[in-house]
Image (cartoon, rainbow, N blue to C red):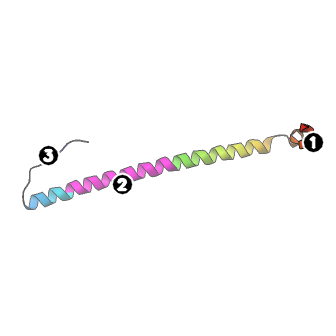
Amino acid sequence: MQDKSIAASGRDKDAVAALIAEDFSDDIVKEMNIRFLKSLYIRSHKEYELFRTMVNAISYDQEKLNDDDAN
């Protein structure tokens, strides 16, 4: 982020402070959106892996997976 040095006094100082506060609030919102999207991606990836595992388990030949045949 760029360093901004602004010399202001009186009423202008309040306006500058409001602009800086707004700038930081935008950064916080962007950061929250990034964290939300990251956690959403991780959760969806885990759910997809679980789904894939379940589909693979269903697709095995059940006759070959009997406990009686394992002994």
- Give the residues drawn in magenta, as a range: 19-39
Residue 48 appears left or right of 35: right
**Callout 2–callout 1 Cβ contact below 8 Å:** no
**Callout 1–callout 3 Cβ contact below 8 Å:** no
Q: Residue at x 17, y 57 (%)?
A: 17
Residue type of the residue flagged with mark 3 = Ser
Percent x, y of residue 25: 30, 56
Percent x, y of residue 45: 58, 45
* Residue 40 in the image: above or below residue 70: below
Residue on which the image places disc 1: 68
Q: Earlier in the sequence, mark 2 or mark 1?
A: 2
For the residues marked 1 and 3, what is the alpha-carbon distance in whole angstroms? 78 Å
Q: Is residue 66 magenta?
A: no
Q: Residues within 10 Å of mark 1 (few under 14, many from 20)?
A: few
Residue on which the image places disc 3: 5
Percent x, y of residue 35: 44, 49
Residue 29: mark in rendering: 2
**Callout 2–callout 3 Cβ contact below 8 Å:** no
Q: Is residue 20 magenta?
A: yes
Q: Earlier in the sequence, mark 1 or mark 3?
A: 3
Of badges 2 and 1, nearer the viewer stands 1
Q: Residue at x 68, y 47 (%)?
A: 51
Indicate the secondary structure of the residue bearing disc 1. Answer: helix
Q: Residue at x 6, y 57 (%)?
A: 9
Percent x, y of residue 19: 20, 56
Residue type of the residue flagged with mark 2 = Val
